[in-house]
Amino acid sequence: MSRITHEMNHEFADAAWQERHAVTRIDQLREWMRVDADGSLMRDVELGLARAPMAMRITPYVLNLIDWSNFLKDAIRKQFIPVGSEILPSHPLLKMDSLHERENSPVDGLVHRYQDKALLLATDRCPVYCRFCTRSYSVGLDTQSVSKKRAAPFQMRWHSILAYLRTNPVIVDVVVSGGDCFRLKASRLLAIGMGLLSIPSIRRIRFATKGLAVLPMKVTSDHEWTDALFNINHVGRDQGVEISFHTHFNHPGEITDYTIAAAELLFKQGIRMRNQSVLLAGVNDDPEVMKQLVKRLSDIHIQPYYVYTCDLVEGIEHMRCSVKRACQIENAVRGITAGYNTPVFVVDTPGGGGKRDVHSFEHYDRQTGLAVYRAPSVRPNQLFTYPDPLQSLSPDAQAAWLNPKRAERILSDAVETARVKSMSGLCGMQK
Ligand SMILES: *Cc1c(COP(=O)(O)O)cnc(C)c1O
Ligand code: SF4
């Protein structure tokens, strides 16, 4: 495959061509690499891939956004191509599936953690694979370091998912995610949408997808697929059910003429769009970058909804940011534009407490970098901790975390302090 020189050419604007030419192997990547005279960058990528929990898959569209002359620092590259030399040891608190999603699955392929909403895992494939994927335990192909937990074939799961949703009318809001609905066939997308619409208790359906950020030409060129989506939207509107699209842009450089064309089409159809970003070191952990992202998304009617702190995932410690940093960036962004276009910064708490406003910790020890949250609507009697990445801490605090006894102590001290603080808080409220 030759490198793309003419960006808006006909093939390039075709989603099927993009899918066919997605890069999944290192030898294909080599053809894109501009400055690597001695091959050291490619060896670095090889090392990165050997340790990564996610398989590689990148569309030519995304490859074309990378500044290859600035390979190591490029914000797009960092999200999709691992390099061995930047990988740091994981935090001692890391566990696979840190959000405990599998514990909250009443039926295979459905996560029911919150009261009135559920998450449907419709596929385990994505148009690209992100290094920092929370579901690295199941999404994508097996890698050298992780064998994925495979879900049963969709047809088998689908029946019991629908039955569960039908018998639990408390669920009014369904997130269709995965994996990514951009990898669903049009017929399956339609079946999922119409199946959900056949359940009277469901009032809102969201399709969560990275697609608009990495394969926007799907919306403008795969007419069968968009017809299925628009069909679902029309039927939904008639029934008073909101259909929305949840996108995943992390950097303003990901918004191109292709994105604008796709977003315009969705907006005209009346599909509400919201964006969920992940706060990533070296990608968007900069107030100016985040402000630009918020402004540019707002301009194309994609409402900036959430910015997540990065979950604890193997091999991406160097991309995590501290709670302190997340709070700083939130402070810088709030007030620059409409409040409804200002994202809420959240921590999806390890252990299954769900998403909490990053500022809402019961206790946060900036020295040890441990924040403690409560989740009264999800698990009222439990406290949840989120650790800052070790590299954001002092050498002494880092050493403490690496000593199992001292680490245990940090945890129990923080939890105890939070307990005392929240008890006195409750007493204050009761007066
Ligand atoms: C994020 C998530 C949802 C949706 O939550 P919102 O805060 O409404 O966006 C639903 N279920 C699970 C398990 C989730 O992780
Ligand atoms: S698109 Fe979403 S589900 Fe897929 S790899 Fe990226 S973060 Fe994971």
Image: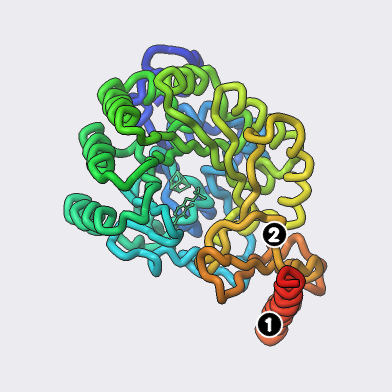
Relative to residue 166, is residue 234 depicted above or below?
above
Residue 360: image tag: 2
**Total residue callouts:** 2
Query: Where residue 237 appears, x then y in whole percent?
Result: 34, 28
Q: Is residue 36 visible?
A: no
Residue at 55% of width from left, 36% of height from top? 249
User: In the drawing, does residue 208 fall left or right of residue 229?
Assistant: right
Disc 2 on helix, strand or loop? helix
The amino acid sitting under disc 1 is Ser
Res 137 → quadrant: bottom left
Q: Which residue is mark 1?
A: 412
User: Which amino acid lies under the numbered mark 2 shown in the image of this protein?
Assistant: Ser
Against 262, residue 289 (above or below) is below
Instruction: Name which residue lies at 55% across and 71% down.
Output: 380
Of residues 137 and 87, the one nearer the viewer is 137
Up/down of 194 relative to 44, above or below:
above
Q: Quadrant of the C terminus?
A: bottom right
Q: Residue at x 73, y 68 (%)?
A: 429
Residue 71 drawn at (x, y percent): 62, 37
